[in-house]
Image: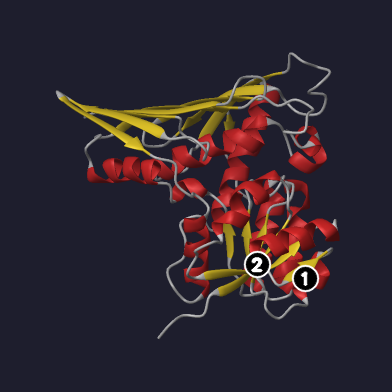
Amino acid sequence: MAVRPVGFAVLGLGNLAQSAILPAFRGTKRATLVALVSRDLEKASRLAAVHGAPGAYDSLESCLADPLVEAVYIATPPGAHLAEVEAAARAGRHVLCEKPLAVTAPEAAQMVATCAAQSVLLMTAYRKCFEPSIVFIRDLILSGRLGTLKILHTSFSERHALSQTSPPWILERKLAGGGPLMDLGIYCVHTARWLAGEIPDRVSAFQWTHNQTLFREVEEGMAFSMYFSSGLVAQASTCYSAALSSTLYIEGTHGSVSLTPAFPYEHPRVLNARFGSIVVRKNFPVVDEFRPQIEAFSRAIRGGPLPPSGGAEGYIDMAIIEALYRSAEAGVPQVVEFGS
């Protein structure tokens, strides 16, 4: 028997939504786009017509009164996520929320608790859990071909300036929660621990700001390390003043693997691995990285397996990020702390 597609609303119609999230609903079998929400009703109506959504609203409250809406994909600035997630959950709607889940760990924990209390699903939009090159690396690790992981290097940077291509809120602490660590470095944090299959015990970090005029409220860049109980050390960096670039490199006792670029969704990837005298090279073409997470969430809503990036994953990463900021401020390593 055919399973009825989950009706989704998308809240927040900025660049990410228009370039990646809305197009991802085309051809989805388990989800259908039923409503768009923006403070600009004309914008919502115009994009709804383009993407075939029957509903367009200028407030989340009015959208949640639409009986066709079963789930909400939240693509607004992180500083707005808490109120929006809780409103959707209390209206009985499942929530797929863009990363970072919140601007603080306590806010993320509150979202997780509210969704659990309302018996709705909460998923953090970590698309890398579904992207073929990262999944291939995880399979290599799980197969034992890399041996015991010892060192992981990763980076993600992108140049931001006050221009049409950079939303102004990206440099506002209240809405963004921080600088590149929150926006880009979170990919390094989550991917490292998802591949390692464990949570770091301690972290250390150093942050800098050279352009005091542009980066008045958030850091310009950060270099950081995460220390795992298995002995793995992950070293990472992220900044807002370098050209778009990213990489992932892992060394194990039996081999190594590298991926470049690692994180942007617009570019093809090249993977190189070495196991003694055996060299593996694979090319990964550009794929839709948003559709698989929408499909996985929809499958879970209809009673299928839970996705690997639930709301708790977003909370864990926020606890790690808070420890990194504490370390950068104190100048010494910090323990990753979780609320009771």
Residue visible at 66% across and 30% down in the picture: 180
Disc ID at residue 52: 2
Report crowding for label 2: few under 14, some 14 to 19, many 20 or more residues within 10 A (C-alpha): some
Query: On the rendered structure, is 302 left or right of 269?
Result: right
Looking at the picture, tell me which residue is in the foreground, 299 or 105.
299
Identity of the residue furthest to the left in this view: 277
From the viewer's perspective, is residue 249 above or below residue 265? Answer: above
Query: What secondary structure is marked by label 1?
Result: helix
Q: Position of residue 89 (x, y in %)?
A: 70, 70
Q: In this view, does 329 lie to the left or right of 141?
A: right
Q: Is residue 219 above or below residue 56?
A: above
* Circle 2: residue type: Gly
Seen at 67% across and 47% down, the residue is: 105
Q: Does 208 sit left or right of 157 as displayed?
A: right
Residue 151: percent from left, percent from top: 37, 26
Q: List the residue tagged with mark 1.
A: 63
